[in-house]
Image (cartoon, grey):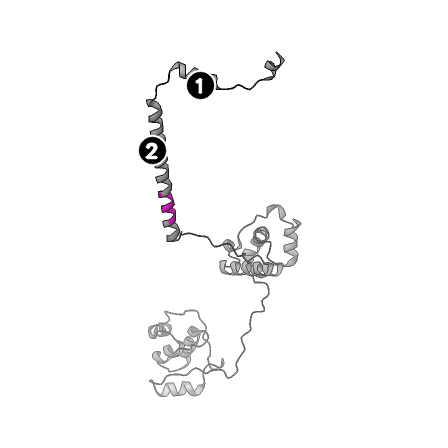
Amino acid sequence: MSNAPLMPKATAVWLVENTALTFRQIADYCNLHELEVKGIADGDVATGIKGLDPVTGGQLTRDEIQKGEADPAYALKILVSKVNIPVQKSTGGPRYTPVSRRGERPDAIMWLLRNHPELPESTIMKLVGTTKTTIAAIRDRTHWNASNIKPVDPVSLGLCSQLELDFAVQKAARKAGKGQVPDAAPVRTLIPAAEVLGTVANVAAVAAAAAEAEKAVTAESAKNDGKQYSADSVFAKLKGLKLEPTEETTKE
């Protein structure tokens, strides 16, 4: 059966002790194995478990039991309640923190205040299950155990999941306007082929011009090296230069 009664083993104990149903019928009704029901009857399984009456519990009727006792192949049907109990939705209040973890909440609050100051107090209250008074005392360093508080990641402490923390941080950043990234200039990772070809052509032209200039300089230097200068020609050129008069020569 897809639906099993509440406390199936206790129900099986009561059916074994108070009815003439077969092990197969009890196993199918309680969603147990037939050998497990046989072990209950032999006293090897579920020892010390008190039987639970499914009739008084509103999960089985006397007519169903009588039908099953009359026909060993009959499958018992669980009694479904006609009253639909609405499922209570979460109110979104502070999360419940186990007693063993409550001493670690100040460390988590300190970590959140230091690393994510954009988080509002209401979000911190939901993440770690604390109060505004505690948050204010830790922020102002007026907490009674302030000297021993050390910032610790609440995820590592098991107070919240990484997904919940990331969602809260992103939501707070969007509200504060920090999640918007300004439009940046596109980064060029590849140069177009036309520019590459033009660059190669320019480099080749510059190299050719440099080679021609080098050849011209080499030829000019070779031509000058072939000339023979005499002392008379050098002094003649020097005499031809006109020196500008200086202040000392004018005074003299």
Q: Secondary structure at mark 2?
A: helix
102 within the magenta span:
no
Residue at screen point 38% across, 85% down: 68
Of the residues shown, which amino acid type is indicated by label 2? Lys
Residue marked by disc 2: 215
Residue 139 visible in the picture: yes
Q: How many marks can you see? A: 2
The residue segment tinted magenta is 198-204
219, 119: nearer the viewer? 219
Residue 98 in sight in this render: no
Residue at 38% x, 73% y: name it: 40
- Circle 2 packing at 10 Å, graded few (<14), some (14-19), many (20+), is few
Residue 206 in picture, x, y percent from top left: 38, 41
Q: Position of residue 29 (x, y in %)?
A: 39, 79
Reply above or below: 97 against 53.
above
Image position, residue 82 (x, y; %): 50, 84
How far apart, in angstroms, are the residues tagged by discs 2 and 1? 29 Å
Pick the residue in front: 184 or 161: 184
Q: Residue at x 43, y 74 (%)?
A: 8
Residue 200 part of the magenta-drawn span: yes
Q: Residue furthest top?
A: 252
Q: Amino acid at mark 1?
A: Lys
The percent coordinates of residue 116 (x first, y second) are 57, 54
Point out the frontmost of discs 2 and 1: 1
Label 1 belongs to which residue? 237
Residue 115, placed above or below residue 249: below
Which numbered tag is attached to residue 108? Answer: none
